[in-house]
Image: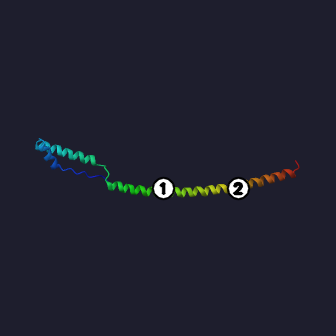
Amino acid sequence: MGAIMMFDTQAAVDRLQSAGFSEVQAKGVSATLKEVFSVASEGLATKTDLKELENRLEIKIADLKSEIADLRGDNRAIKAEIGALKWLIGTVLIGVLAIIARLYLHAGV
């Protein structure tokens, strides 16, 4: 990753000299500019870097969507099991209450 910034030092020297800089001054400024551009371009992403990142993110998003769909399916299954357990607990509770009522009535209280 990192963009390559091109800097034509000789063209910069020529332009600076034509603007009145001495050769030594022009070469010094040109070298400094080249160094600044080199440091400034470190860590910059190229179009290719961005496209690769986009592709990786699209894959991750697709994976997350798939996981979410799986979790929704699991959630529906759990809700169905909870519904069945409610009916089972209700049935057991009614049975227990019927047994208690029968014992209470037979005890003659």
| Dot label at residue 87 | 2
- Badge 2 element: helix
**Which residue occupies 80% across, 54% down?**
99
| Dot label at residue 64 | 1
Q: Is residue 88 above or below residue 39?
A: below
**Which residue occupies 14% across, 44% down?**
16
Q: Residues within 10 Å of mark 2 (few under 14, many from 20)?
A: few
Q: Residue 59 appears in which quarter of the rendering?
A: bottom left
Q: In the picture provided, is 12 more to the left or to the right than 69?
A: left
| Dot label at residue 31 | none
How has the structure been colored for display?
rainbow
Can you give x and y, in whole percent of width and height, for residue 105 in the image? 86, 51
Nearer-N-terminus badge (2/1): 1
Can you give x and y, in whole percent of width and height, for residue 89 in the image? 71, 54
Q: In the picture provided, is 107 more to the left or to the right than 17?
A: right
**Which residue occupies 32% across, 56% down?**
48
Can you give x and y, in whole percent of width and height, for residue 56 in the image? 40, 57
Label 2 with label 1: CB-CB less than 8 Å: no
- Badge 1 element: helix
Q: Is residue 24 above or below residue 47?
A: above
**Which residue occupies 39% across, 55% down?**
54
Task: Give amino acid for label 2.
Answer: Trp
Q: CA distance from mark 2 to mark 1?
A: 35 Å
Task: Give amino acid for label 1.
Answer: Leu
Can you give x and y, in whole percent of width and height, for residue 98 in the image? 80, 53
Q: Residues within 10 Å of mark 1 (few under 14, many from 20)?
A: few
